[in-house]
Amino acid sequence: MVLTLLTGCGDRTNIKVIGQITDEETGEPINNADISASCWYHHNIDDASLDRKTVKTDNSGKFAVDFEKGYAVNLVAKAKNYEPKQISNDLNENEISFAIKLRKAKANPTLISFTDKNSLNLEDSEKDPYLRVRFQGLKSRQLDFNNVKTYGFDFSSQTTKIETANCDIWFDPEKKEGQPTILRTNKSGGLLPIFENEIKSSLLYEKDVAPKVGYTTEYKLKGNEVGFFVLCRDGKTYAKIIFDLGLIDISSPDGKGSFYKEFGRKFRYLYQPDGSTNLAYPNSDIDPENI
């Protein structure tokens, strides 16, 4: 007889997570795959936790992980030469089973990428991708809305620039304090939004083919965009940007007795310089926690 103990938020105890990893095309089991399993527990505001465990699959592609308690499980499966996959499920039973099919990683040698969100450094490197506007401050501590600079991004050189004529995407420098809301591109380029509800797991791997139509040179943010396809200013190369969750909102001395304020967004990107629409990210060795 098995006694199931239910606590707050649907928590369960003595949880067993089992599963099998197979090749999406052949159905063959994948042995020695890395499984990162996380289990959330939340009894009340003072009693909450996240337990994370890692295991490898056996010769049959199977794995098993046990947790003491929790209400939801997240799995990330990764194997050599395969694209990682992430799956989340609420615990409706004490035992949950996953059948995960991994897709072979496709080679894309011409793709240029910046995917390590932890290496962003706004102060030290023009290579770090961001879009921002800078307002000069006045002695009255107000902002001078007639003294504003906008920093865009050029995919061909992978650099941030202040000359928007040499950029593929930038924020319109609106005369107001706070986050900018209008994105612009060169007349020969364009951008196409990607929304939250279009992504099942990770934008890094999904939406890997850029559309050829539907682009606009001006876009007002709605708040539910996770990224954009970008038609670059040459009118023939494509990129995809992935917004980081954090917003740029900083105030700093300008070294002249006053200050400036900056607002904007950080992002990661994939850029295809060969003129194709292929934005498939082939790196099967990425840290599963970053997808």
Image (spheres, rainbow, N blue to C red):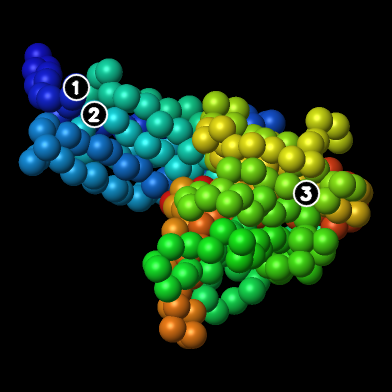
Residue in the picture at 64% in, 43% down: 182
- State left or right for residue 260 relative to residue 276: left
Q: Residue furthest top?
A: 1
Mark 1 and mark 3 in contact (Cβ < 8 Å)? no
**Amino acid type, label 3:** Thr
Q: Amino acid at mark 2?
A: Tyr
The residue at which mark 2 appears reads as 71
Give the answer, above or below, for where 11 lies relative to 217: above
Q: Tag 3's secondary structure? A: loop
Q: Amino acid at mark 1?
A: Gly
For the point 64% across and 74% down, the residue is 126
Q: How far apart, in angstroms, are the residues tagged by discs 3 and 2?
A: 45 Å
Q: Position of residue 123 (x, y in %)?
A: 52, 76
For discs 3 and 1, the disc positioned in front in the rendered view:
3
Give SS at disc 2: loop
| Residue 29 appears in the picture as rendered | no
Secondary structure beneath dot 1 equals helix
The answer, for residue 150, to whether it is visible in the render is yes
Q: Residue at x 41, y 39 (%)?
A: 75
Residue 258 placement: quadrant: bottom left
N-terminal of the pair, mark 3 or mark 1, is 1
Q: Which residue is mark 3?
A: 185
* Residue farthest front in this picture: 140
Residue position for label 1: 10
| Sequence-first tag of 2 and 1 | 1
* Disc 2 + disc 1, Cβ < 8 Å: yes
Query: How far is disc 2 from disc 1 in space, using C-alphas?
Result: 6 Å
Q: Residues within 10 Å of mark 3 (few under 14, many from 20)?
A: many
Foreground tag (3 vs 2): 3
The residue lying at 42 percent from left, 73 percent from top is 139
